[in-house]
Image (tube, helix red, strand yellow):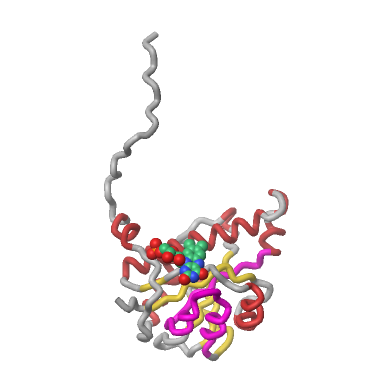
Amino acid sequence: MPEREPAPATVALPPGAPTALTPLLTGRRSVKELTGDVLDLEEVAGLLRHAAGVDGAGHPTYASARSAHLVSVTLVAGAVAGLHPGSYQYQASRHLLRTEALGDQRPALAAATVDAHWVSGAPAVLVLTADIRAADARFAELGPGQGDRFAWLEAGLITQNAYLWAAAVGLGVAFIGGLDRAACAREAGSVLPAGHTVLGLLPVGNPAY
Ligand SMILES: Cc1cc2nc3c(=O)[nH]c(=O)nc-3n(C[C@H](O)[C@H](O)[C@H](O)COP(=O)(O)O)c2cc1C
């Protein structure tokens, strides 16, 4: 038998053929300087549908363990044409917004961040939340804390969808995960689904540069 060559310490990789996705993946950025320009409802609807919605056949744009869809998306609108400032629950299956509370909720969200107070000036903010206790109960037979993990992972998938869609249409988004849990409950508790934990914020607007 011929003697095997020793395995190299490193393997140089081919570049991988570019696809239509390549410019979106390489062009996506966390955009933290937004203009205060009013967003069209169309722009917000497109972002919601592609980040956390379903296609024409009702199939979601992101994977979810057992299709449980643990993450809820609340749109906090400040400057969106056709929407009163307030918070709205996104219902993906029907692609509609349910009004939850009126009034500008953005300062409350901004106050709950560790280092992103500029969020108060974003025209809109997507708030990703989950009922962690219910999620854990749903996956209890897999062991403790699995629903919790799945919810956070789901939030990551939704976030990357939002980044790619934003890159495609020229919107700015950034994931804000540094949150003060107590401040979230205190400041934003009244505008979010009962019993939910905030997983992260996605402020959205037009890039300032
Ligand atoms: C899990 C996670 C949490 C983050 N939390 C914050 C945050 O609290 N505040 C903030 O300004 N940016 C936050 N970011 C954004 C990162 O700082 C940003 O992704 C980083 O600057 C790299 O920029 P890029 O996405 O353009 O590559 C977070 C990003 C991730 C993925």
Of all residues, the one furthest to the top in this rendering is: 1
Q: How many marks?
A: 0
> Along the line of sight, which residue is nearer the eye, 122 or 178?
178
Quadrant of the rendered structure where residue 22 is?
bottom left
**Residue 95 x/y as whole percent:** 48, 73
> Along the line of sight, which residue is nearer the eye, 96 or 120?
120
Q: Residue at x 37, y 63 (%)?
A: 164
On the rendered structure, is 190 left or right of 43? right
> Along the line of sight, which residue is nearer the eye, 63 or 18?
18
Determine if the magenta segment contains residue 112: yes
Quadrant in which the N terminus is drawn: top left
Q: Residue at x 51, y 56 (%)?
A: 63
Quadrant of the rendered structure where residue 82 is?
bottom left
On the rendered structure, is 5 left or right of 197? left
Compared to residue 97, the image places residue 6 above or below, namely above
> Along the line of sight, which residue is nearer the eye, 29 or 21?
29
**Residue 29 x/y as whole percent:** 37, 65
Q: Residue at x 31, y 62 (%)?
A: 27
**Residue 176 x/y as whole percent:** 50, 70
Compared to residue 190, the image places residue 4 above or below, namely above
On the rendered structure, is 109 left or right of 51? right
Q: Is residue 59 visible?
A: no
* Residues rendered magenta in the picture: 104-132
Q: Is residue 155 visible?
A: yes
Quadrant in which the C terminus is drawn: bottom left
Determine if the magenta segment contains residue 126: yes
Compared to residue 8, the image places residue 134 above or below, namely below
**Residue 77 x/y as whole percent:** 48, 83
Q: Residue at x 38, y 77 (%)?
A: 33
